[in-house]
Image (cartoon, rainbow, N blue to C red):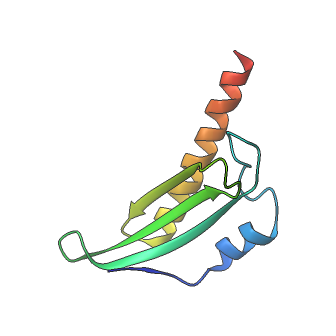
Amino acid sequence: MKEDLPPNELELKIASHTGVIPVCPFCGSTALMRSSVNNAGFGGFTIYQARIWCTNISCNATVLLNERTLEVAQAGVMANWARAQRAQAQKGQA
């Protein structure tokens, strides 16, 4: 069963400081990150999920990643969010 984790230091930093993660690549609004854990999923392995989403309710942009450790999930989802930002910037320059 998936359960939300309490915000860790990284999530609190993202929530209170702009610039920790890029703004939404689609609308330019701020983004937040939350994490959860599934202790009974995928063959008995514990799976951590990190999700970054746009705070603009009209946008709905989101990226999520499932990994075996919280740190890898958070680092990976941040990298994917930044990759989406770079891809959108390149489209704008074309």
Q: Is residue 45 above or below residue 75?
A: below
Residue 6 image offset from top left, x and y in percent: 57, 84
Q: Tell me if residue 39 comes above or below residue 43 in the rendering.
A: below
Residue at the far front: name it.
Answer: 58
Residue extending furthest left?
43
Q: Image quadrant for the N terminus?
A: bottom left
From the top left corner, tell me how far across and down residue 29 is, in percent: 76, 50
Q: For this view, does 94 lie left or right of residue 83? A: right
Picture quadrant of residue 89: top right
Q: Is residue 16 left or right of residue 45?
A: right
The residue at 59%/59% (across/down) is 52
Identify the residue at horizontal 75%, vertical 59% (top origin).
20
Residue 73 versus residue 23 in the image, above or below: below
Q: Is residue 35 left or right of residue 23?
A: left
Foreground residue among 54 and 22: 54
Q: Position of residue 74 (x, y in %)?
A: 54, 64
**In the shown orientation, is residue 93 left or right of residue 8?**
right
Most foreground residue, 65 or 58: 58
Residue furthest bottom in the image: 6
Between 24 and 20, which is closer to the camera in this rendering? Answer: 24
Quarter containing the C terminus: top right
The residue at the point 44 percent across, 67 percent down is: 49
Number of marks in the rendered image: 0
